[in-house]
Image (spheres, helix red, strand yellow):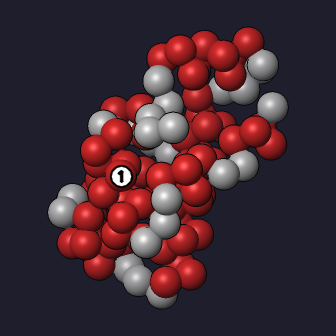
Amino acid sequence: MLKVSASDYKFFEKMNVSKGQINRTIGANIRKKRNELGITMKVLADLAGMAVSAIASLENGLRVKDFTPYELHRVADALGVSIDSLYEGIDECI
């Protein structure tokens, strides 16, 4: 899975899971992995080739759906994890 698509959101909405819950889960996973590495948002942004504000938006679950699969993949690569690991716990929202 590379991105939470519109059809994914529709599926989760049927299961009574909000977009906000999905976005916050992905954001929490990014923050957790970053903290485990002991790096700042600035370092992660530099490694991923993104702005610090973009990393902050992702971690806060604000705009996950606005990011492309490529951008989420860059974040996962910068963290040294699979992109699937960013989606860990979404099934627990159901």
Residue drawn at the location 29% of the way across and 78% of the way down? 43
Seen in the picture, residue 39 relative to 83 is either above or below; the reply is below
Q: At 34% across and 39% down in the image, what residue appears?
A: 69
Horizontal and vertical percent for residue 15? 78, 19
Residue 77's place in the image compared with 91, above or below, is below
Q: Can residue 31 be spotted in the picture?
A: yes
Q: Position of residue 56 (x, y in %)?
A: 38, 58
User: Residue 20 location in percent, x, y?
Assistant: 59, 34
Q: Which residue is at 36% across, 64% downward?
A: 77
Classify residue 20 as left or right of residue 49.
right
Q: Is residue 56 left or right of residue 83?
A: left
Q: 62 or 36, which lies in front?
A: 36
* Mark 1 Cα-neighbour bin, 10 Å: few <14, some 14–19, many ≥20: many
Quarter-wise, where is residue 8 in the image?
top right
Q: Is residue 14 left or right of residue 86?
A: right
| Relative image position of residue 12 (x, y in whole percent) | 68, 22
Q: Which amino acid type is marked by label 1?
A: His
The residue sitting at the bottom extreme is 38
Q: Secondary structure at mark 1?
A: helix
Q: Image quadrant for the C terminus?
A: top right
Rendered residue at 44%/39% (across/down): 2
Res 60 visible: no
Residue where numbered disc 1 is placed: 73
In the depicted structure, whether residue 85 falls above or below residue 5: below
| Nearer the observer, 9 or 55 | 9
